[in-house]
Image (spheres, grey):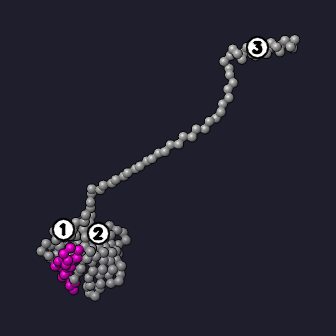
Amino acid sequence: MLKKIFCFSSLAIVIVIFTCPIGITSCTKQTVTDTVYLKKTDTLRVTDTLQEKDTAISTALLTANSWKAIYDRATVGGNMLYYVRGGSSNTMNLDNEYITFNSNYTGVYTDGNGNQTTFTWSFTDSSYTKLTWQWNSSPAALVTWENVFYDNGALHYTEYYTKNGVYYYSQEIRVPK
């Protein structure tokens, strides 16, 4: 009977194999390597049409306004002094000080206490980068401004003079009052 069952089972397995869509397949893994070449070219061109130029110093510019200090770094008789308008660590006070140049080559210097003294002035070179003013103070002093230029609405220069035997040297920036 075992033989019958075995034969019958074999016959059933053969029928199932041929009638059912079941198949046995074998798979192989295939590695595909795809090489992509990317050529990227960036071209950046910047054209600046805005050209900032310093305004040349002239009599008209200098006499258009009174000029107040916004920055001053000075050596006075060997002592270092410093001023920035609105600053908290200033070693000198120029808050109320200003200078006025007139078109007839005269001017008025107003110190921090409101005292005024007159002066005469002139450019000493054809490029308007150096000027002197004869200050009618007591005693009188010849004040020299060198490296004068105008940038971003401000007058920049180096100043030096001797008064009462004391040498003054400073880098200053002034704006219209």
Q: Nearer the viewer, residue 157 or 128?
A: 128
Would you identify the image quadrant in which residue 32 lies? Answer: top right
The residue most toward the left is: 104
The residue that label 2 is drawn on is 70
**Residue 47 is at least partly visible in this image:** yes
Would you place residue 150 above or below residue 144 in this image?
above
Counting residues from the start of the chain, the first of labels 1 and 2 encountered is 1
Percent x, y of residue 110: 21, 75
* Magenta-highlighted residues: 117-141
Percent x, y of residue 78: 35, 83
Disc 1 is placed on an element classified as helix
Asked if residue 136 is among those painted magenta in the image, a careful observer would answer: yes
- Name the residue at 69% across, 24% down: 24
Numbered badge on residue 69: none
Counting residues from the start of the chain, the first of labels 3 and 1 encountered is 3
Q: CA distance from mark 1 to mark 2?
A: 18 Å
